[in-house]
Amino acid sequence: MLKIQYFLPSPLVEAAQPPASELPPVQPRRRRLRLYLVGSESDTQSAIDSLHHLGYAERFEWSRVISIPENGLLIRPNPGDVLRYLQRYRKPEVS
């Protein structure tokens, strides 16, 4: 014979627990910040190294070298210029 037994919590235990919130708290959206370096490969690497020494960004966070086509990308590069970028997510400022 199968016997099912149900247990109900004590009313004292329920009273001691804080009421569950109905809606989860709204999380502010994180803001995206994109940094672009355009210049010669050695100049962009030098800028990345400087930002690393200042503690702003690790070298590995930057993209690999991206060649810029001659017709540009809404920018007009000098011959031999490359593009490097870094994308960060900033925590929203608390008011």
Image (cartoon, rainbow, N blue to C red):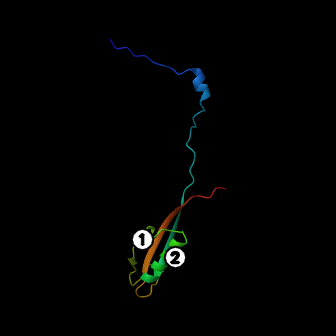
Q: Is 69 displayed left or right of 30 in the figure? A: left
Kind of residue indicated by mark 1 = Ser
Q: Residue furthest front?
A: 53
Q: Residue furthest left?
A: 1
C-alpha span from label 2 to label 1: 16 Å
Dot 1: element? loop
Mark number displayed over residue 6:
none
Which of the pair 43/19 is nearer the observer? 43
Q: Residue furthest right?
A: 95
Q: Mark 1 packing: few (<14 Cα in 10 Å), some, or many (20+)?
A: few
User: Would you say the residues marked 2 and 1 are in contact, meaning their CB atoms lie under 8 Å apart?
Assistant: no
Residue at (57, 35) in percent of width and height: 20
Q: Is residue 72 visible?
A: no
Q: Position of residue 39 (x, y in %)?
A: 46, 82
Q: Residue furthest bottom?
A: 79
Q: Which residue is mark 2?
A: 50
Q: Position of residue 68 (x, y in %)?
A: 40, 80
Kind of residue indicated by mark 2 = Ser
Q: Which residue is mark 1?
A: 63
Question: Within the image, what quadrant is residue 15 found in?
Answer: top right
Q: Position of residue 86 (x, y in %)?
A: 47, 69
Residue at (39, 76) in percent of width and height: 65
Q: Position of residue 84 (x, y in %)?
A: 44, 75
> In the rendered image of this protein, does residue 57 appear above or below residue 27?
below
| Position of the N terminus by quadrant | top left
